[in-house]
Amino acid sequence: MNGQTATLTPARRAADTTPAHHAPDRPRPAAEAAAPAPLPSEQLLQGRKTIEISHNGTLYRLQATKLGKLILTK
């Protein structure tokens, strides 16, 4: 350096920093803060092959196949 101090304008300061979503001192939104732990299918099915799930007034059916796959139908 040549001994001079550079003064950053707000626009220049914003351009020289990392994006806000990467700033460590800025709180993250709740959705990003802690992802929910996966829910094991065994906990949903509880030994059954088929369960019904009500979501927003619509009934869905979750079915476990013999091959260990899951099928969700309306």
Image: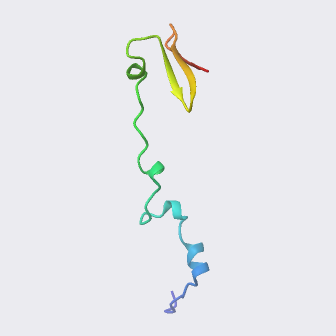
Residue at 61% from the left image edge and 21% from the top image edge: 74
Classify 66 as above or below 52: above
4, 67: nearer the viewer: 67
> In terms of depth relative to the viewer, which is nearer, 13 or 28?
28
Relative depth, front residue between 11 and 71: 71
Residue 65 vs 25, above or below: the answer is above
Display coloring: rainbow
- Residue at left offset 38%, top offset 22%: 43
Q: Is residue 58 left or right of residue 32?
A: right
Callout count: 0
Q: Residue at x 41, y 29 (%)?
A: 39
Residue at 43% from the left image edge and 63% from the top image edge: 24
Q: Residue furthest top?
A: 66
* Residue 36 place in picture, x, y as percent: 42, 39
Q: Position of residue 17 (x, y in %)?
A: 53, 71
Report the residue that reaches farthest toward the front: 57
Residue 71 placed where, x, y %?
A: 56, 17
- Please provide percent x and percent y for residue 67: 51, 9
